[in-house]
Amino acid sequence: MNLEEVEVLFDREQVMARVKELGQQITQDYQGKNLLVVGILKGAFIFMADLVREIDLPLEIDFMDVSSYGVSTVSSGEVRIIKDLDYSIREKDVLIIEDIVDTGLTLKYIKDILTKRHPRSIRICCLLDKPSRRKADIAPEYVGFVIPDKFIVGYGLDYAEQYRNYPAVCVLKPSVYEK
Ligand code: 5GP
């Protein structure tokens, strides 16, 4: 990790301890259900890989990749599906795994699309939540950490496709993107 560019917010140990707690909670809540874990690419891939190993239940996994329309850095809420799920979610208890909920517009769109496909239930689990920026009426049922409005990289999250491999959840120093 280049500590001139990032500041550690939660180290690997803190993240793993919280992921373990989330896994235990989900294990309790989904006893006897038909759990399908849906990861939103690419940001959620590391969180999801760690989380599913802390869920002690039979489960299936699938992935979806979406992208916002336009080039603006501000989320418009208009989302294009780049990769859809491989299988039907009818009668499944769907748990959407997202890296971070910011305005909530992306997740609102995804949740609305998936709800129309008749799952038995649908919930959201995110690693990070920035509630101060929320625009859409969306409240994740499982949240790793509530954080202030800072730009996060590491543990799957990127800036220009870099930093995803950093093991800690980090704040990207503004000097990097204001250059
Ligand atoms: P929303 O529609 O909730 O505003 O946007 C959610 C998406 O924006 C996330 O899935 C993530 O891809 C991106 N995003 C929002 N905040 C951050 C951040 O602090 N760091 C990174 N790397 N991506 C973010």
Image (cartoon, rainbow, N blue to C red):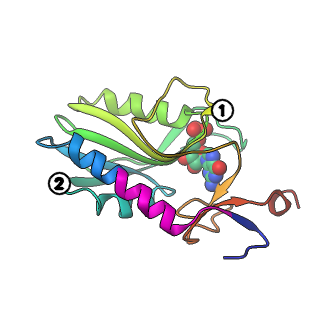
Q: Which residues are magenta?
A: 8-21
Residue nearest the observer in this picture, 111 or 131? 131
| Residue at 43% in and 63% down | 16
Q: What's the distance in space between the residues labelled 2 and 1, CA to CA?
A: 34 Å
**Against 173, is 24 above or below?**
above
Q: Secondary structure at mark 2?
A: loop
Quarter assignment of residue 11: bottom right
| Residue at 52% in and 23% down | 137
Query: Does residue 178 belong to the magenta stretch?
Result: no
Residue nearest the observer in this picture, 58 or 120? 58
Identify the residue position indicated by label 2 in the image.
57
Closer to the N terminus: mark 2 or mark 1? 2
Identify the residue position indicated by label 1 in the image.
132
Residue 164, position as x, y percentages in the image: 57, 67
The tally of labels here is 2
Circle 2 packing at 10 Å, graded few (<14), some (14-19), many (20+), is some
Quarter assignment of residue 94: top left
| Residue at 85% in and 61% down | 175
Direction from residue 59 to residue 80 in the image, left or right: right
Q: Secondary structure at mark 1?
A: helix
Quarter assignment of residue 118: top left
Q: In the rendered structure, which amino acid carries the disc numbered 1?
A: Ser
Residue 46, position as x, y percentages in the image: 45, 64
Query: Does residue 16 belong to the magenta stretch?
Result: yes
